[in-house]
Amino acid sequence: MNNALARLSQASLRHASTLIFLGVLAMFSLLSPRFLAANNFVNILIQSASTAIVATGMTFVLLTAGIDLSVGAVMFVSAAVAGKMALAGQPLWLAALVILLAGMLYGAVNALCVTWLRIVPFIVTLATLYFGRGFGLWLTETRAMNLPESVLRVGAARIAGIPFPVLMLALVVVAAHLTLTRTTFGRQVYAMGNDADAARKAGIRTERIQFAVYVICGFCAALSGLVSVVQLGAVSPSFGNQREFAAVAAAVLGGTSLFGGRGAVLPGTLLGALLIQTIENGLVIANADPYLYPLVMSAIIFLAVLLDSLRNQQLQRSQRRHIRPLPE
Amino acid sequence: MRRGEILGIAGLMGAGRTELARILFGLDPCAGGSIALNGQEISALTTRERIARGLAFLTENRREEGLLMDAAIRDNLALAALSRFTSSALIDQPRLVAAVDQMAASVQLRGGGQTDQPAKTLSGGNQQKVVLGKWLLQNPAALILDEPTRGVDVGARSELYRIIQQLAAKGAGILFISSEIEELIGVCDRVLVMQRGAVAACFDRSEFDRERILGAALPAGEES
């Protein structure tokens, strides 16, 4: 009996984020019947695309026990550049190409500081965060840019019936999942996050892995900025502000450890991003007081992290080694 | 060191045995001299390139340097050999798992073949078997063992010796560093004795003698 109870609590802890997700869904469904409508779920998916994409890149970095605080700034810079180019009459595909390359370059700068200059990721990316925001403000002259209709049309476009942001989201998440679980590189990312020293002694080029994850993260941040800008059709000076925290929160809600080596994009990070967006969406539909949003959000993030900590403790307890009497 | 030979390195603490191993594996720079593997000069290569040429190194400190304690046994075993199981871009999962589980069986890993459990759940001896298995999957040409039996129980020790001897019989050269002279006498074909960073003596199997090895390990003038 005791055993069954322990197993039940273990299972519920392991799927904590899924359970919270279901709980949130149930709560909002009770609060508002409109929440349950099918097209609202499509809305949630579309709205969460940007966060989920940037959180996917963040997951790579977190898995190596690093962090990238500059993603929000990268989103801003890439949206600003794309906006400028669109206003100058350049085709959108060219703008997309330029900002994706710029995002990777940004990630490469972060990576060089971390691997070559050996500065702590937290500090490096904090510095590049301020640089990015400053650069973006200079570029936009601190004015909001309203982009031409053609940009918004891309955001609303459907390819084979799938909305553009959702398609991007699916591509990124599936590619990331395959990379992490089915390639040598992915395994090496986990190995490095687990124990960089042991990984190095097994012949893994840890610097290269580290370099790659920041480049991936920069790429995802730029793509996320693009997906966001085609949905909003405008770039304001606060674009992408504090998105780094939403990205980290989504990854951690999905079970990714801040200390590296543990976590997954699918379902983990995707679920985390969906959870955050669902709460926001639900609060809007339930006509909640806007001042309440951050409070509810913080409570749920706190709950998720608390569950993660409980899960860790229990995992450790279950892995304690016992002396078992031999069966007679 | 010859093919198929188990070469022991004896010496006191601080005689430079671990330093020798780290230099051979390319972890620390070499002050002078050259290192060759299969007749090829490898002194200038990185650790990674040396691994690719068939060098393997079992550190004396498996907890901190050899194993990913939180990762599954299976992932630990697969770590060094991953690229060999990658066709085009993706890992050939079934083939990898089969090879890894077969390796787990051939090193007689305890725990009922549950290779998805984290490595830290294993006992010292079984952890050491995982590290050894990780390198065996690479079919190493030369294997450096630094205190492989430290913290390993008697039963697992004899299994480790057996695995090492099998590997030598297949033609790999093995460098066996140990502080236990009985162990060296029992396993090795030849024993080098190091003292203060240099080789002080060399004994063939026929000349093995506990007293003489110990005598060579002690600094001159301090013999009792």
Image (spheres, coloured by chain):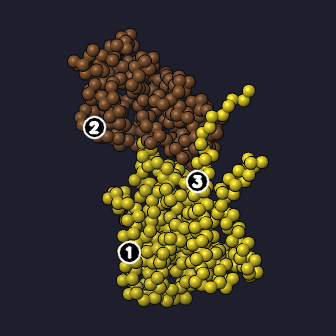
Chain colours: A yellow, B brown
* Distance from Cα at disc 2 to Cα at disc 3: 43 Å
Q: Can you give x and y, in whole percent of width and height, for residue B190 in the image?
A: 38, 18
- The residue most toward the left is B221
Per the image, label 1 sits on a secondary structure element best described as helix
A120 to the left or right of A148: left
Label at residue A312 = 3
Label at residue B30 = 2
Q: Are marks 1 and 3 on the same chain?
A: yes
Q: Amino acid at mark 1?
A: Tyr
- Kindly identify which residue carries mark 1: A130
Q: Amino acid at mark 3?
A: Asn
Vertically, is A195 above or below A114? above
Mark 1 chain: A
Mark 2 chain: B
Vertically, is B176 above or below A119? above
The quadrant in which residue B203 appears is top left
* Distance from Cα at disc 2 to Cα at disc 1: 43 Å
Per the image, label 3 sits on a secondary structure element best described as helix
* Distance from Cα at disc 1 to Cα at disc 3: 34 Å
A232 to the left or right of B201: right
**Front one among B107 and A208:** B107
Q: In the rendered structure, are the residues bearing label 2 and label 3 in contact, judged by CB atoms less than 8 Å apart?
A: no
Q: Which residue is drawn at the image coordinates 38% and 87% (left, top)?
A: A141
Quadrant position of the N terminus of chain B in the picture: top left
Q: Which residue is drawn at the image coordinates 42% and 51% (left, top)?
A: A206
Q: Amino acid at mark 2?
A: Cys
Quadrant position of the C terminus of chain B in the picture: top left
